[in-house]
Amino acid sequence: MRLVVLIPVFDDWTSLQQLLPQLGECLASAALVADVVVVDDWSIEPPSAGLLDQAGGGIASVTIVRLKRNLGHQRAICIGLCHVQAALPEIDAVVVMDGDGEDRPEYIHDLVEAARTSHLGAVVFAARKRRSEGVLFALFYRLYLLLHLVLTGRAVRVGNFSLVPARFLAALTMHPNLWNHFAATIYNSRIPYRLTATARGRRLAGRGKLSFVNLVTHGLSAIACYGETVCVRLLIGSFLLQALLAAAMLALALFGVWGMSPCPWAMAFLWLAFLAVVPFSASALLFCILLLSFRRAEPVPPVSHYQQFIESVHRGRG
């Protein structure tokens, strides 16, 4: 199987320098060979010396695609996929992974075997069996998973670590949501996918640069890929809530007809809640109409203009 390993990097060259030898050994032990494409998301620090010459083992070559400005992790992956599709059309699949060591290279073999089982008929995601973050992060993460499920109707527990068969690259790079979130774009498209269990590795060097604000933005970007679904679910939910409040107020009114004295505070609370939900329903309806009206405009696919963000492409001697 002809592979490309796509790795976005932002000022994390020390980790990548340690990862590449491990990646080469794991590929060689699995009888695999891959070209490594590193997307430099406008790093301030220069790449490690000799990085382009680290071909060996299962690594056939190393290429650095430098961007003109910092675009963020997800857009770096998007541009990398577009570049791979255009520059390496003869490959069978692309493995997307982070360069800090948390995506363990030995699991590439599992991704490949799962892809072979499906005859390269589905994207294979690495689903982590357990997480190693602190209690506070785990709490917020579970709240996010609940929010994602309620708003989109889909449960998700995967990151970027995955294998994408080349047959799906054309469809994937035509999807405008790929700018926002790689995994959510696949989940929200008609591209088939499957999961294989993995464990999270440890960061090889330094500390992560993802702040809490960036983490929240990343999560909301995934939900934004389901914009129409979210609006419709909010609209239906608000109408249901209004119906429940109206039924409760009617029940209290019937208590008065039957000679039972209803609590005035309860009726006042129900009226206030009902009036508060009305503008929310109107806003949800308006957002639904606006989103649907955007369908008249032709969306701009990433593959049509990704090249304007690339500053240079440097390929090693492999």
Image (tube, rainbow, N blue to C red):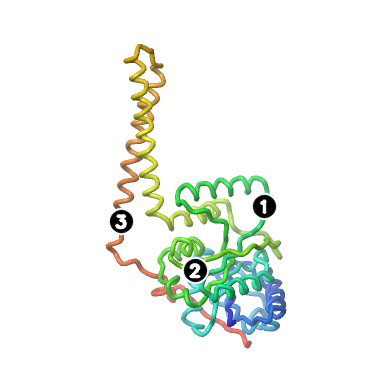
Q: Is residue 6 visible?
A: no
Tag on residue 69?
A: 2
Name above or below for residue 316 compared with residue 301: below
- Residue 44 is situated, as x and y percent measured from the top left of the image, at 58, 68
Disc 3, SS = helix
Q: Which residue is mark 1?
A: 133
The disc at residue 170 is: none
Q: As drawn, is 72 to the left or to the right of 112?
A: left
Q: Which residue does the numbered mark 3 point to in the structure image?
A: 292
The three-letter code of the residue at mark 1 reads Glu
Q: Upstream in the sequence, badge 1 or badge 3?
A: 1
The three-letter code of the residue at mark 2 reads Arg
Looking at the rendered structure, the number of numbered marks drawn on it comes to 3
Which mark sits nearer the N-terminus, 2 or 3?
A: 2
Above/below status of 280 relative to 62? above
The disc, 1 or 2, on the residue closer to the chain's N-terminal end is 2
For marks 1 and 2, give the one nearer the viewer: 1
**Does 149 sit above or below residue 76?**
above
Name the residue rendered at 46%, 68% in the picture. Answer: 191
Circle 2: element type: loop
Residue 132 x %, y %: 69, 54
Q: Position of residue 179 (x, y in %)?
A: 45, 65
- Disc 2 vs disc 3: Cβ atoms closer than 8 Å? no
Q: Residues within 10 Å of mark 2 (few under 14, many from 20)?
A: few
Q: Which secondary structure, mark 1?
A: loop
- Of badges 2 and 3, nearer the viewer stands 3
